[in-house]
Amino acid sequence: MTNKKLIAIDLDGTTLQSDGVTISDYTKNIFQSVRKEGHQIVIATGRPYRMAIQIYNDLNLETPMINFNGAMTTVPGKHWEHAVSKHINRSLVFDLIKKQQAFKLDFLAAEFRRKFFINSFEHASPSLFGINNFEPYHQMRMEKLDDDPNAILLQTRFTDKLQLASHIDDYFSNQVSVSAWGGQNGILEVVPKGVSKASALKHLLKINGQDTSDLIAFGDEHNDIEMLKLAGTGYAMKNASDTLLAHADQQIAYSNDEDGVAKTLESLFL
């Protein structure tokens, strides 16, 4: 491969080790070497900006970052004319609260770039939001939702979270896009209709004057499906969910805990 590539990397279950924090020095060094060859590495994650910015900085990236499964694309620390921030109508938050019992929701949270509000702390893990403890400020109140959020995060006890994603999509008459992540945890993320990691990557490819054949993507979960389908080459991790495998061009032989992304990039470019 000699053409300059746009390399999209998911974080949880893909680039990060299973503790959700660690990136090995080996991975950091390989990423730096790949960038020196002229290729762009772009984070594409369901995480909010506030939970990805430290990772972005640790990797010494200067490229755009995709958050909220495509609802936000920015270049951290810079005013970028191509920045995108899409929002979901806050009335949908209250519609979902009304359906909390029917959808078996433990909680729902309105997510913004640097803040969030959650309607129940009882079954929620603070670590899911990148904090050690919930504070009263995080409690959702109608008067706090004076802006439309970028995304709505849900945790469900529904046995089949992909089926519930379809139900929610139907309930809102296809006004939203719903994706699943978090492995065995019942995590769903609701974003504006048509928004995905793939839609954000199409935006970047257009800016760069690149084609989908110039895109390489790595992922492990349901929310990576569109991204891997879009990419010229879509790689599923060794630890990828069965849901994703059908949409990958190749499943790599290494997991996120085995530096799978870095080992693949090293074999491709170095």
Image (cartoon, grey):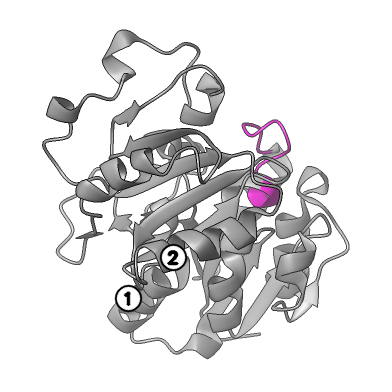
12 in relation to 210, above or below: above
Packing grade of label 1 (10 A; few <14, some 14-19, many >=20) is some
Q: Residue 248 in the image: state x and y as whole percent.
A: 72, 77
- Quadrant of the rendered image containing residue 116: top left
Q: Residue 245 in the image: state x and y as whole percent.
A: 77, 71
The residue carrying mark 2 is 169
Magenta residues span: 13-23
Q: Amino acid at mark 1?
A: His
Query: Observer-nearest residue: 12 or 257?
Result: 12
Helix, strand or loop at disc 1? Answer: helix
Q: Residue 101 in the image: state x and y as whole percent.
A: 49, 38
Q: Is residue 183 visible?
A: yes
**Which residue is found at the position 83% from the left and 47% from the top?**
258
Quadrant (top left, top right, bottom left, bottom right) of the C terminus? bottom right
Magenta stretch: includes residue 18: yes
Q: Earlier in the sequence, mark 1 or mark 2?
A: 2
- Quadrant of the rendered image containing residue 156: top right
- Most common secondary structure along the magenta stretch: loop
The residue carrying mark 1 is 203
Q: Amino acid at mark 2?
A: Asp
Q: Which mark is residue 132?
A: none
Select label 1 or label 2 by which is in front: 2
Q: Is residue 36 visible?
A: no
- The Cα–Cα distance between marks 1 and 2, rounded to whole angstroms, is 24 Å
